[in-house]
Amino acid sequence: MNNYYFHLEKQNIEELMLSEMKTKNNCFIHEKKSKIIIYKGFILDENSQSTIVCEVSFYKKKNTNKYLPRLKFRKLDNNLEEQKNSRCWRF
């Protein structure tokens, strides 16, 4: 999977679109103009030492066929790599 994150402070969220996969078992976030770049999540904050991201995945409920977003908050280094001893929060 790619490591593209949409930067909420530097990019316009109106450029994004949510689409269902052809297999109808998942969704993905991409640019409206092109489906080439698929975003893993969002950059919420960054400083000189770390970057806070929110990764989004979607799960389809069997009884309603609706997608539920699952959020995972992570603290990464500025190269978007996992930091040692970092925590992950799931919602």
Image (spheres, grey):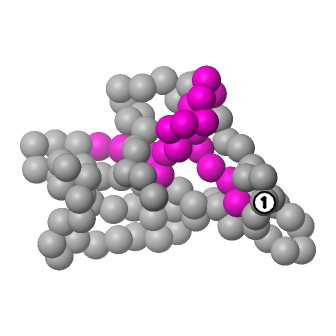
Q: Nearer the viewer, residue 1 or 40?
A: 1
Q: Percent x, y for residue 60?
A: 76, 67
Tell me where residue 75 sits by quadrant: bottom left
The answer to whether 84 appears left or right of 13 in the picture is left
Residue 84, x across and y down, in percent: 15, 72
Residue name at image x 41 percent, y 34 percent = 8
The answer to whether one can see residue 52 in this image is yes
| SS for callout 1 | loop
Pick the front one: 83 or 46: 83
As drawn, is 21 to the left or to the right of 40? right
Vertical position of residue 83 compared to residue 51: above or below: below
Magenta residues, start to end: 26-45
Residue farthest to the left, as pictured: 48
- The image position of residue 38, as x and y in percent, is 52, 44
- In the rendered image, residue 42 lying in the magenta stretch gets the answer yes
Residue position marked by numbered label 1 in the rendering: 23
Query: Percent position (x, y) of residue 21?
Result: 73, 52
Callout 1 crowding tier (Cα within 10 Å): few <14, some 14–19, many ≥20: few
Name the residue located 16 percent from the left edge and 42 percent from the top edge.
47
